[in-house]
């Protein structure tokens, strides 16, 4: 069994939630040996992060270098290639940094690469059987990965439930870099925070959320009318923002806002995992979509296969009727 | 600036209900609507806008078969100057690394200042761009949502990171960028536009033309193979309302009232 490493993201001394999920994924590959965490960074933040890891890691490899103070995927890749033993299996969270790091790392390690893995179904010698999704989450696939020369596996956030293990707190091992100063063809300049919009969707307990199924900018009013009648706010999924029909501040998802409503009415939203990643707090989800295969129906509480352009106005009328009756 | 955009033809998941075939080894492809991978279309538009400002040319390339020519034509109708089809029996069964190796061989025989891909494909996951960059030893950035050309040697780019924040960096040319949707507004392509480019020849390359063999591409070289497809059974699944529209609306109204969905 190759040694399993998990590359851990951290910021300001705080370890990312994915750290415990990667440990859970590692346990699925090798139930016996605890995985090794590997962290890059600099200074007090790195020290704090190394000491804040979940107990599931038996060992922590720390690569401290001033050039790694801000995580630049190209530099991190060079650092990892420098210290990782040949044939290692490396787990990385499939989010914005993992997408930057993982593919190139697999090439430089001469290892196999499987991205966005949701499940690990078995190990047979060097052959690992994993689960991925294709076609916008409508269909899953079993994929075989040959780990005989190592592997880089990016893990979908939220797919593996953290398990508390009885492992001792990890031993921290310094891994100095053999090479001199790391140099990259890409240099970080600054981070520009997301703009805040006219409506703060994170403050609303009821959201009427629209996706690609709204079809035209003039149809956004159908959702707004319903939201007004319900006392809700209008939020959306990525395609609506890409088309510039609503502001970015209305987007629910990993690249948008994280919301915790009580009730979420998903209208014409397919339910990509990046969208669902922004939906927390276990809301009651009612999904309406024309496509009965839309992945949103796998997570919704109640589903209707219908055209939102026809259903929303009827629902709005019914809500208004009820209001006028109860007002009398 | 000479720009190469790597594109793919994929089943349009917003238009199709994807079903398994009876053997479970593929999806039912008979009645599928195919289109350009959405992310790739934004990448082509971005390339066209850069070339419109600074001069140069845009080449669109795909690895596939004859059917895939239609997406090259579509992107040429948008304004791409050249279409290239890389096609060979020997490529079938290639994993992401194999596709990246094919593209690398093509790039090494031609010169490009900038190579763009989509962030991901409808049926895959953010692999080829980053692998291609590492093979070429070019800098790479994923999830790019704006590009500013600083001079002939570098770009200022923005990446989409968590919560809609933007990470701004400088990157040396030549480089590979994977483009996020929403970076621009891709221009409309009508049937007329596609007819106008119908007779422009598309250059085609095979394995031998690029000096590739089964040691690096195709099924034999693949470290990653799909075994089968299956229908996911995630979570409990929704309680589906199967009444008339009016009945469904009434039920939704009841549920909204019961669950705190009306203020």
Image: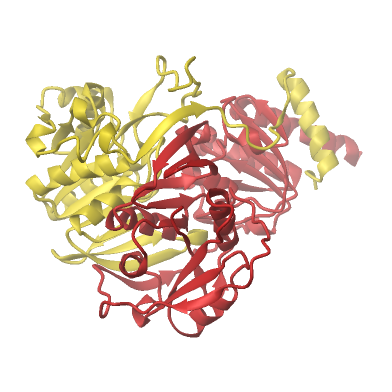
- Nearest the viewer among B31 and A145 is A145
Residue B181 visible here: no
- Nearest the viewer among A291 and A167 is A167
**Vertically, is A222 above or below B148?**
above
**Vertically, is A60 above or below A271?**
below
Quadrant location of the N terminus of chain B? bottom left
- Colour seen for chain B: yellow
Q: Is residue B60 left or right of residue A13?
A: left
- Nearest the viewer among A85 and B190 is A85
Of all chains in the rendering, the one displayed in red is A
* Residue A48 coordinates in the image, percent (x, y): 55, 80
Residue A140 visible here: yes
Q: Is residue B2 left or right of residue A16?
A: left
Q: Residue at x 63, y 50 (%)?
A: A279
Q: How many marks?
A: 0
**In the picture, residue A86 is in which quadrant?**
bottom left
* Residue B159 coordinates in the image, percent (x, y): 38, 60
Q: Is residue B55 left or right of residue B224?
A: left
* Residue B188 coordinates in the image, percent (x, y): 31, 34
Q: Residue at x 28, y 44 (%)?
A: B97
Image coloring type: by chain
**Vertically, is A67 above or below B13?**
below
């Amino acid at each position: 069994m190759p040694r399993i490493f998990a590359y851990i993201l951290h910021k300001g001394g705080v370890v990312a939630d994915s750290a415990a999920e990667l440990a859970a994924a590692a346990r699925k590959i090798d139930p016996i040996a605890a995985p090794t965490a590997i962290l890059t960074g600099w200074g007090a933040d790195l020290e704090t992060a190394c000491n804040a890891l979940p107990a599931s890691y038996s060992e922590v490899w720390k690569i401290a270098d001033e050039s790694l103070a801000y995580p630049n995927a190209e530099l991190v890749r060079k650092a990892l290639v420098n210290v990782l033993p040949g044939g290692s299996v490396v787990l990385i969270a499939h989010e914005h940094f993992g997408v930057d790091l993982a593919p190139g790392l697999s090439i430089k390690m001469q290892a196999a690469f499987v991205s966005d893995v949701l499940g690990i179904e078995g190990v047979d010698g060097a052959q690992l059987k994993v689960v991925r999704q294709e076609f916008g989450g409508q269909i899953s696939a079993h994929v075989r990965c040959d780990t005989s020369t190592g592997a880089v596996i990016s893990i979908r956030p939220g797919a593996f439930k953290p398990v508390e293990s009885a492992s001792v707190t990890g031993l921290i091992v310094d891994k100095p870099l053999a090479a001199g100063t790391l140099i990259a063809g890409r240099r970080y300049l600054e981070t520009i925070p997301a703009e805040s919009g006219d409506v703060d969707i994170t403050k609303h307990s009821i959201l009427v959320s629209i996706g690609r199924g709204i079809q035209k900018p003039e149809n956004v009013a159908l959702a707004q009318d319903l939201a007004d009648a319900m006392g809700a706010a209008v939020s959306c999924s990525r395609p609506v923002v890409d088309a510039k029909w609503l502001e970015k501040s209305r987007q629910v998802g990993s690249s948008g806002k994280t919301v915790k409503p009580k009730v979420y009415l998903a209208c014409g939203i397919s339910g990509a995992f990046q969208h669902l990643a922004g939906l927390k707090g276990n809301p009651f989800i009612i999904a309406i979509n024309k496509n009965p295969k839309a992945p949103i129906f796998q997570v919704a509480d109640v589903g209707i296969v219908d055209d939102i352009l026809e259903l929303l106005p009827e629902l709005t009328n019914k809500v208004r009727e009820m209001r006028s009756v109860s007002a009398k | 600036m000479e720009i190469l955009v790597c594109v793919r033809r994929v089943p349009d998941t917003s238009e199709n209900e994807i079903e398994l075939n009876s053997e479970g080894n593929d999806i039912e492809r008979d009645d599928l609507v195919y289109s350009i991978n959405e992310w790739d279309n934004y990448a082509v538009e971005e390339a066209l806008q850069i070339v419109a400002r600074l001069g140069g040319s845009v080449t669109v390339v795909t690895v596939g078969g004859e059917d895939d020519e239609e997406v090259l034509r579509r992107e040429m109708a948008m304004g791409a100057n050249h279409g290239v089809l890389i096609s060979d029996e020997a490529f079938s069964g290639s994993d992401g690394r194999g596709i990246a190796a094919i593209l690398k061989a093509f790039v090494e025989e031609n010169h490009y200042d900038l190579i763009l891909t989509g962030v991901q494909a409808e049926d895959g996951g953010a692999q080829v761009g980053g692998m291609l960059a590492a093979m070429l030893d070019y800098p790479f950035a994923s999830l790019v949502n704006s590009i500013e050309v600083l001079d002939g040697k570098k770009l200022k780019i923005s990446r989409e990171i968590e919560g809609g924040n933007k990470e701004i960096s400088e990157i040396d040319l030549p480089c590979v960028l994977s483009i996020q949707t929403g970076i621009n507004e891709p221009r409309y392509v009508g049937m007329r536009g596609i007819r106008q480019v119908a007779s422009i020849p598309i250059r085609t390359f095979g394995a031998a033309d690029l000096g590739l063999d089964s040691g690096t591409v195709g099924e034999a070289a693949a470290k990653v193979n799909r075994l089968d497809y299956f229908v996911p059974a995630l979570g409990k699944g929704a309680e589906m309302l199967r009444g008339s529209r009016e009945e469904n609306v009434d039920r939704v109204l009841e549920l909204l009232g019961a669950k705190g969905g009306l203020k």
